[in-house]
Image (spheres, rainbow, N blue to C red):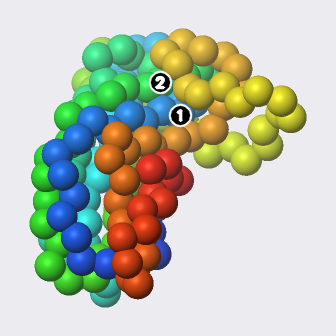
Amino acid sequence: MVAQFVSDVLPPQVVPAQRIGYGAEMLEVAASNNLFSILRLYGCNVAGTTNLGTMLAGARHTVELTTALLGSCRVDAGSAVTFNEPWRLVAEWGVGGLPVNTATDTHNASISFDTTLAVGAMILPQDADGGNCPSIIIFSTDLVTDFGGTEASYGIGI
């Protein structure tokens, strides 16, 4: 895992099975590292001590990272999860793969969570895109974020 993000407390709800898109600018330090991006999404209890259900188990991207900071994005099928208590969404960004030479190669990677976006049209991450883009997770079905009702506003996060 390279980075972990945890949401504010969310109300109990059923999160349906849905498509989940994600992307960020990433790189591997050496071309022989053979690294691929991974995102894992799950819900934990408010204290953060118990995994209440996994929405995205951490499927590995099929396109290897390069030594240049370029876009790495993917859409995966997420699983339905029922949260019967208040919970937090946990997003774990990372990499996986097998180095060519395990004696000298390491699993060193970088993910850019840059906040300096250019003014004008925003670019969403695309594989091998070198443009300045935000790290993003997009749910095809909203998550309910309001304890007072059914207002759904978590279509895009991170």
In the displayed structure, does residue 109 sit left or right of residue 10? right
Q: Position of residue 46 (x, y in %)?
A: 31, 84
Q: Is residue 151 left or right of residue 134?
A: left
Name the residue at 63% across, 38% down: 134
Q: Which residue is mark 1?
A: 24
Verify CB contact (< 8 Å) between mark 1 and mark 2.
yes
Given residues 154 and 92, the one toward you in this image is 154
Viewer-nearest residue: 5 or 81 = 81
Q: Which residue was labeled with disc 2?
A: 72
Amino acid type assigned to the residue bearing label 2 in the image: Ser
**In the rendered view, does 2 fall on the left or right side of 125?**
left
Q: Is residue 31 above or below residue 139?
A: above
Percent x, y for residue 121?
76, 27
Q: Nearer the viewer, residue 93 or 85?
A: 85
Q: Is residue 85 above or below residue 106?
A: below
Q: Position of residue 158 (x, y in %)?
A: 53, 53
In three-dimensional space, the C-alpha distance between marks 1 and 2, rounded to whole angstroms, equals 6 Å
Q: Dot 1: what SS?
A: strand
Dot 2, crowdedness within 10 Å: few (<14), some or many (≥20)?
many
Q: Earlier in the sequence, mark 1 or mark 2?
A: 1
Q: Residue at 69% of width from left, 43% of height from top?
A: 114
Which residue is at a point 54% across and 13% down the rendered structure image? Answer: 128
User: Which structural element holds mark 2?
Assistant: strand
Amino acid residing under circle 1: Ala
